[in-house]
Amino acid sequence: MHQELAQYFRCTDDVAEFRLGGPLSKDSGYFCFGRNTVCYGRSGAGSRAKSVNEPLYDALDDIHFQGSHVDLPFDPAEIAGNLRHERYVTASGSPVRRRFAKVVRSSYYLVRPLLPVKVRKHLQKLHLDGWKKLAFPHWPVDTSVDNLLENLLTVAIKSNGGNSIPFIWFWPDGANASAIMTHDVETQLGVDLCKKLMDMNDEFEVPASFQVVPEKRYPVPQSYLEEIRRRGFEVNVQDLNHDGHLYDEWEEFKRRAAKINVYAKEYGAVGFRAGVLYRNQDWYNMLDFEYDTTVPNVAHLDPQHGGCCTVMPFFIDRMVELPVTTTQDYSLFHILNDYSQNLWEQQFKIILGKHGLINVIVHPDYINGPREEAVYRALLQRYARLRKEQNVWIALPKDVNRWWRQRSQMKLEQRNGELRIEGAGSERARIALASFEGGRLTYKVLDASASVPAPLARDLSAVEPA
């Protein structure tokens, strides 16, 4: 029961003795766990709604302290997994509706190559009509998974007599958050504009990855890939041919995945993104990549609705998922008709408040005019300020993947009465202290040289219900 909390925060296993307070329901549904924390799954108390639009039962009231144990009315791993893997979407959609959506998608992608952007965007607006009425995930950024685990950490602090809980901070060198820039290259025009984007990125010292479509869209000469890598950027694989059908059928997906894996080796790519952010996380084990960056945080403006409800990387089997946590440029320009920084700024603020990962998709194909170029230049300026003024780690996606893997293996160990971080990459790791002060959870990141006394035996005399 404590493993989900320990994996997210990389704290010691004994921070709390969580256990199920009773048998779980046979049915799954929506409930909440405190304010702004929507859950989906089974629970052992209260009720579960079939729709998130119904009144939601608050399971926070059903936590009970029994001596050294904390009884929970649900399994945190199940709830977090349901949200990250978007299982609530599959459960809420009817088979007839899914089949109809598949037919519409197939028809659209059959004629898409013949449609200019001005026509495509009108069709997409029709398809997305009503997106503002979608109640879940929360727009413009959903942090339900992060809220869930923060609430559990608060419960652990209270069960620990109010003592601070040490954990391994989320980012290297004590960075406040992280940000990556990703470029999906969709057409020959995008290929031609890559050099221009690299020049702009270099001007502001913002590294980026370029997701390249291996087949049918445009030629992919080795000289093009080598130029990207030579300049310090990253090459990733984007889909196979970007036709919108990658995840339609299992047998066809296996065939395509085998070819995608060949291109991964040929390109020296460790990251993957599917075209149009289509996804089926249950099939990811067929892809030979270290990380994926396809799953949106909130997918209201994408053809495949849903969202992983977290601003932190997470594991899908052996792959690290770097979720897309912001609105991509195409949707901003052509669906919302917005050429300002306002939405991105709103999303950045929420992500920074959770010390999460900012992940922006900008297509070279759409930075093809003075207005679009001005928007992108302003975004790069914002990234530079984030690094300088807010201690945000601006990194290549592959470096974030490497760090998240290393952090997942690090441990807090006691040595000579003090806590130390052990494991590969620990020289860049920092210990943080989580406390509950003034009615809210707070973090304090310690200097690398700071010593932390090993936790004392838990004092349960001050325990109060959450």
Image (cartoon, rainbow, N blue to C red):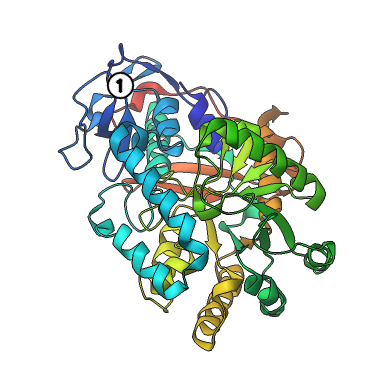
Q: Residues within 10 Å of mark 1 (few under 14, many from 20)?
A: many
Residue 397 in view of the camera? yes
* Residue 211, placed above or below residue 32: below
Q: Residue at the spot x=55%, y=24% of the render?
A: 13
Q: Residue at the spot x=46%, y=36% of the render?
A: 85
**Residue 121 x/y as whole percent:** 39, 69
Classify residue 427 as left or right of residue 441.
Answer: right
Classify residue 358 as left or right of residue 286.
Answer: left
Residue 33 in view of the camera? no
Extreme residue toward the bottom, this view: 370
* Residue placed most toward the observer, 285 or 325: 285
Classify residue 247 as left or right of residue 191.
Answer: left
Look at the image and tell me in which quarter the N terminus lies: top left
- Check disc 1 and report the residue beneath it: 73
* Residue 360, placed above or below residue 238: below
Q: Residue at the spot x=29%, y=22% of the render?
A: 43
* Residue 331, placed above or below residue 440: below
Label 1 sits on what residue type? Answer: Pro
